[in-house]
Amino acid sequence: MPAGRGGLIHDARVLIRFRDFRRLLAVRLLSQLADGVFQVALATYVVFSPERQASAGAIAGALAVLLLPYSLLGPFAGVLLDRWRRRQVLLYGNLLRSLLSLGTCALVLVSVPTWLFYLSALSVTAVNRFILAGLSAALPRVVDGERLVMANSVSPTAGTLAATLGGGLALGLRAVLPNGASADAWVVLCAAAVYATAGLSALRMGRELLGPEPGQRQPHILAAIVSTARGLLDGLRHLAHRRTAAQTLIAIGVLRFCYGALTVVLLILARHAWSDDVDHGVALLGLALAVSGLGFFTAAVITPWGARRLGRLGWMAWCATVAAVLLPVLGLWFRPGPMLVAAFLLGAASQGAKIITDTVVQTTVDDGYRGRVFSLYDMQYNVAFVAAASVAALVLPPDGRSAPLVVAVALLYGLTALSVFRLRSSASPSL
């Protein structure tokens, strides 16, 4: 398959000829666009609302709401998904999220306990796990087997771009609306409207088009849940005999922890240290997210080259090394300019390491265990981010300037780099 940006565009042009693929992709793009709007609306409400005193603890709570449903529900989503028509999941799931978003919008406008707001937001993000799983499971029903790998590359990438666009749309709306709870409510209302549009767009596909076939639906939900839990344990046992995959997963977990802690630092700095003006703080946060996203894209472009030159694990180790060396140089200033450069470099390093981890797991884990190991990987990846936010909540001062935390994270990057260099020396030459 062609690599790089040109290859992705070529693949998209090929796939867009499939009518049902176009319709399924439209549901994905609208759904993930709404996700981006809702998630940024939640973040800006927690961090930038003038009437709320944002803290690292509040940010940790918001990240838990956004990420933990993916971690805890992810492996079990398929158990229910295989019992329902996937077209109906996309229709009613998005309509349900629209309704729940309206409830969240109402809570933003009135004074309610924080836990009640989080519970409402959690209900929206929890449904998302079923939507994403349904979109992935439906792909084989809308393209032929020859182009399935192509579709698995194009669809998630397009969805990620849509979510990024949704985040930018939310920040743009937030910037032009007057400060206050009403601005956040309008943004959440926008997310609700896009969720409803995503759900209704699923009606363009036939009720039975996306499966599953009636005879293949899971008859016993409890047995399926128990089987899924046992499968995760089997995945852990398998990893115990796959040293390279296990240690690489541990390394990416530590790197994700580091990135999560620095994300909280960046949020607190944008809210409390860099400007007293909320709009300026939102703009700085939007710029930081943009340059970090540019780092992710840069990693996707250069990682294949770096892996060929240095070996897969060698490239991962150098990504961690660059982060360890440059983080103190750029981060200890706690100024917007150097921190934006750090956001770009750490975004590139983090995504480069993740691409390598994905490849190592795919090539060193037996095919029969690969799905279960990736489920464990997904859980660890999100839990590490939330755990980092929780630790940051305990140690960060109100303005976010914590030299000990930055130095500690740099040391973690360095130790991870050393461990991956050691792993490379004993791993297969192909790695």
Image: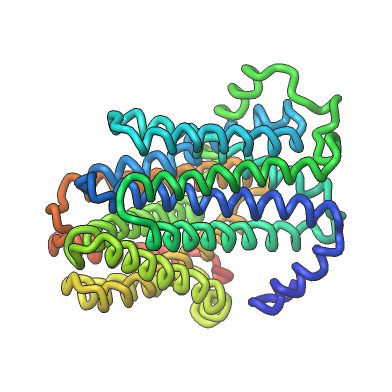
- 420 and 285: which one is in front? 285
Q: Looking at the picture, how far across and down is residue 36, in whole percent? A: 51, 53
> Which residue ends up furthest to the front in the rendered image?
178
Q: How many labels does the image show?
A: 0
Q: Quadrant of residue 268?
A: bottom left
Task: Name which residue lies at 61% across and 37% down.
Answer: 130
Tell me if 80 is positioned left or right of 380 in this view. Answer: right
Residue 219: give x, y in percent of width and height: 75, 18
Asked whether residue 412 appears in the rendered view, the answer is: no
Residue at screen point 23% across, 76% down: 330
Q: Which x, y percent locates residue 218?
A: 74, 24
**Colouring method of the image:** rainbow
Q: Which of 279 and 297 is in front in this view?
A: 279
Q: In which quarter of the image is residue 282?
A: bottom left
Residue 148 located left or right of residue 36:
right
Q: Is residue 49 above or below residue 406?
A: above
Front-most of residues 372 and 286: 286
Q: Which residue is drawn at 60% across and 29% down?
A: 228
* Horizontal side of residue 364 vs 335, given as left or right: right
Q: Whole-percent x and y of residue 310?
A: 49, 79
User: Please, is residue 359 above or below residue 95 in the view?
Assistant: below
Decide: is 184 above or below 313. above
Instruction: Report if residue 375 is visible in the image.
Output: yes
Q: Quadrant of the C terminus?
A: bottom right
Q: In which quarter of the image is the N terminus?
A: bottom right
| Residue shown at 59% from the left, 59% from the top | 162
- Please state if 329 lies on the left or on the right of 129 as rendered: left
